[in-house]
Image: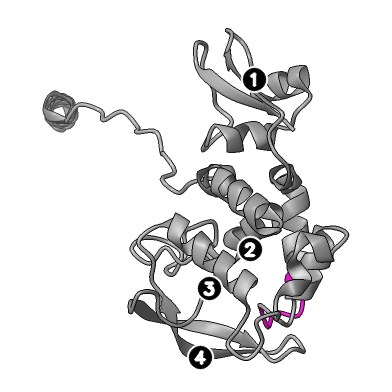
Amino acid sequence: MRFLKKLFIGMIVIASVIGISTYMMIQLFKPADTPLQEYVDECPSVEEFIGSIAETARQLGAENDLYASVMIAQAILESKQGQSGLGSAPNNNLFGMKGKYQNDSVTLETFEDDGSGNLTTVMAEFRKYPSYEESMKDYVRLLRNGVSWNQNFYNGVFKSNTKSYSDATKFLTGSYATDSSYNEKLNELIAKYDLQQYDSPVKNKKTITVADGDSLMHIAQAHNVKVTSIKQWNQLRTDSIEAGQQLNIYQY
């Protein structure tokens, strides 16, 4: 009996030693912990996209009696802020323009609205552009020159023929796009991102240096502008800023 007791205790000791040795071996050969990498969103923010086309839109709008605000809102909506298959490189078609551009095009699936909110899927040929600027200039030519059967087809969007951008977006609904709520979507984007600022010239522009502890909200309040505008003017992807960073501030 005493022998069995000693044997049992010995087995427990051996098992414990094996367990401890195994644990130590695992820890010895365990690979070093890999630090977690911070996720970086590669997709541009809406403000960053706006900043990439806003000044071109401002200039084209001023030169062609058009609302730059509407132009930018259409580009956001039609191209999903430049991230759709049609709106991104190498197609660069910001406005869903169909047909060919300089004999270049791409065929993609799209939705058509029957005017009552019912959508159907169709394949269509869309213009392919070398750059956003070419896409914007071609869009302006369409609005200014109309369509083959009516050169005045888009006269209802001109500043001189409207009281505000909302008149222009209402005209585009059913004429430019079949989406029955097109104007509502455009108006919402214009209001949310303060796009009306691009319908008039910049009165003043200055560059400031971010101080330690500054935030976009603090800077926006100090200069009586909106956070979304600061992000657009500086093509910022996030709200993060650093001390010493320089930011452009516009007055309009």
Tag 3's secondary structure? loop
Q: Earlier in the sequence, mark 2 or mark 3?
A: 2
For this view, does 197 lie left or right of residue 143? right
Q: Earlier in the sequence, mark 1 or mark 4?
A: 4
Q: Position of residue 137 (x, y in %)?
A: 51, 61
Quarter of the image that includes the C terminus: top right
Distance Cα–Cα, label 1 vs label 4: 47 Å
Q: Residues within 10 Å of mark 1 (few under 14, many from 20)?
A: some
Q: Earlier in the sequence, mark 1 or mark 3?
A: 3
The disc at residue 74 is 2
Q: Position of residue 216 (x, y in %)?
A: 65, 24
* Residue type at the position of mark 4: Val
Residue under label 3, please give it: 96
The disc at residue 150 is none
* Residue type at the position of mark 3: Gly
Residue under label 1, please give it: 215
As drawn, 237 above or below 124: above
Magenta region? 177-182
Tag 2's secondary structure? helix
